[in-house]
Image (cartoon, rainbow, N blue to C red):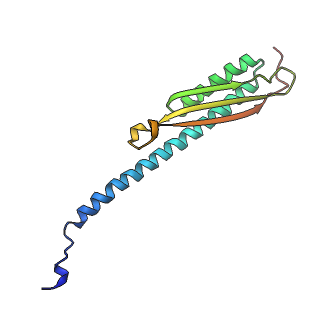
Amino acid sequence: MSCGRCWGDAGSVSVEAAVLVPAAIFVGLLIIAGARVSSAQQAVDNAATAAARAASIARTPAAAELAGTQVARERLGREGITCQESNISVDASQIAVGRAGLVRADVTCQVALSDLALPVPGGTRTITATFTSPADPYRGLP
């Protein structure tokens, strides 16, 4: 009797599949989670940029804060990002008609990852972006 017949490889395919398939699924879920976070980061960056630019052409600090907040919410909605919680802050306290100043927009969005069944603490990832834009000193008088 030969020793090659003592150690057959019958059943090894099912064992390999039992080990490799869950690992492949986990790697696929990590790729999807990474793509979702990357897409959300880009959308939040775009929203912060648009908010600061919209606020920088407003005539008053109150109008700048309102314009920046509206533009950021609109941009997040257009990008298709669903935030569990979002926070938009526009600081336009330095602007006044006829002088230069800076407008700062901060956008924070919590993106859900719990539907991917990954071990993420809290099931969400918080994405934050900040953009500062110079106010146009030559915008029209009120």
Q: Is residue 59 above or below residue 49?
A: above
The one of 75 and 3 positioned closer to us in this rendering: 3
* Residue 121 screen position, x and y as percent: 46, 39
Q: Is residue 128 above or below residue 8?
A: above
Tell me the quadrant of the picture where the C terminus can be found.
Answer: top right
Could you tell whether 60 is left or right of 25 in the image? right
Residue found at the far front of this picture? 121
Which quadrant holds residue 14? bottom left
Tell me the quadrant of the picture where the N terminus can be found.
Answer: bottom left
Could you tell whether 19 is left or right of 74 in the image? left
Q: How many marks?
A: 0
Residue sitting at x 38%, y 42%: 117
* Residue 100 screen position, x and y as percent: 85, 27
Residue found at the far right of this picture? 98
Residue found at the far top of this picture? 142
* Residue 103 screen position, x and y as percent: 75, 28
Residue sitting at x 46%, y 50%: 31
Residue sitting at x 59%, y 30%: 75
The one of 3 and 25 positioned closer to us in this rendering: 3
* Residue 84 screen position, x and y as percent: 49, 29
Which quadrant holds residue 115? top left
Residue found at the far bottom of this picture? 1
The one of 89 and 64 positioned closer to us in this rendering: 89
